[in-house]
Image (tube, rainbow, N blue to C red):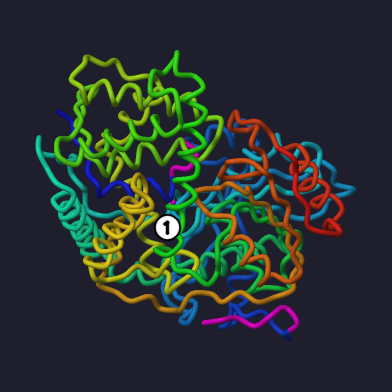
Amino acid sequence: MRGITPSLTVGLSLGLAGLFAAAVPSSAAAPSGAPRTPSVYENQRLTWGPCSEAQTELNAAGAQCAKVTVPLDYSAPGGRTLRIAVSRIRAKATSHRRGILLSNPGGPGGTGLANTLALRPALERVADGYDLIGFDPRFLGESSPVACAPAGPPSVPPPSTSPRADFEASVRDARQTARRCQEHGDNAELLPHASTRNVARDMDVIRAALGERKLSYYGISYGADLGAVYTQMFPRRTDRMVIDSSTDPAATQYELFRSSGAPAEKALDAWAAWTARRHDTYRLGRTASQVRARVERLLARAERRPVDVGGHRLNAPVLRLLLKQPIQHAENNPMLAAMVRDLVDAAAGKPVEPSPGLAAMLELLASPDLADSMVGGALFMCGDGGWPAGGWPEDPETYWDNSVRSRTTQPVFGPYVNGMIAPCAFWATEPREPGTAIANDVPVLMLQARHDNNVPYEGALALHRKLTGSRLVTADIRSHGVYGRGLEGHRPVRCADRTVNDYLRTGDLPSHDFTCAP
């Protein structure tokens, strides 16, 4: 029997959406990324060559790769350094070249060396005017990566359990993750410098090392928040900034996570109505309330006796995680309905051959390498002093109490988003800086799905009010991410795609906020 434990779920929820010192405003005289980066970093000469063998897409596209040297600690620039992996695909339209376009795929903890290349089909001819620049953030991928001590194989949940027992297991796992990361090698020296503000500073060194006065950028989810941080720290060096699916800059990461519970419940209602109309296919109920009741009974059963399916034993926290992943996109309704059908049958003791969607998730969740692959998310969640990635309570009982209170109004996802204890509760080092307070008038194009249940729409509105030079394009859909949805096989929001490409081509923001029809 292969087990899946709650310790894996923080990183998954923040980094697997596709299967997680206030600065001066832009009218100030200088960017707020102080202290000043020495010229030895800004004027360094890069050595370009083939990318590593692992970067097959980049090499096939004719990209070149290099390493940019940055300080480990920007307050001590003469000390230890890091090497940031950077990729480049030169602009085709040299006579109309605009500059450089960087990107970040989110997370926190996502690697991005090939990410800007992956955007090229959505960019269409706009890509020809930019050098497409990818990079792995510090400590991730090929950028001076940080490793933790091996996690070992996932433990198998017991055949009988309780909500409190499941929570206690997650606390033990979070404590173990903190210990195996902080006590490994020289991580104690490195981890205090894993922060969003330092990644923004590294981006600015990349800009300078490439000989550019400004940079353009596209970021999604955490990558969107990273873009907003860059505008705050380096307002005069921001060219054309596009941020997709952003969050409330007044909230901590834990608060942001909790805020996703209510919209996730609404998304489940929408899915339940869709499924009820297809009762002959999925046999989960003829009304939305019947379908929802079936899901809630499944979870109640798993809180006592985990569900055995496909050689795996799944407790209630993991089932909530499995439901949370596909509910983010309306296109996933069929996959989610098939998953629930499988799980209901398995809970009833029937033999089940997992549907493709469930089988893929089970394979991923039970991978012996999964815990190690989620290290990057923990580094930045615990390294940030507040928004966008930090701010996790230290007392485990805070998570438990919030999860219990949430059950009345959020019976499916409330215990999950409120009880998700992070390793940061047991992190031995304190963040070196507070989170970033946003207040500037840098021109920014914002995108947000109105029914995003990962980063709720109200958070984007809050950031929009702080970015007074921004324009907001709303997509009236259930989705996490708006631009380039066709790249993931989802239905494109063509008016949003056109708006982004027009802005990157001309530099002209829309004259007003607007909504793209479904």
Residue 26 belongs to magenta span: yes
Seen at 27% across and 71% down, the residue is 394
Q: Quadrant of the C terminus?
A: top right
| Above or below 359: residue 52 | below
Report the amino acid beneath label 1. Answer: Phe
Seen at 19% across and 40% down, the residue is 154
Residue identifier under label 1: 257
Seen at 18% across and 35% down, the residue is 306
Q: Position of residue 12 (x, y in %)?
A: 37, 45
Q: Local crowd at mark 1 within 10 Å, few (<14), some, or many (≥20)?
A: many
Residues shaded magenta? 16-27
Q: In the figure, residue 243 lies in which quadrant? A: bottom right
Residue 423 belongs to magenta span: no
Q: Determine the secondary structure under disc 1.
A: helix
| Above or below 226: residue 428 | below
Q: Position of residue 500 (x, y in %)?
A: 76, 48
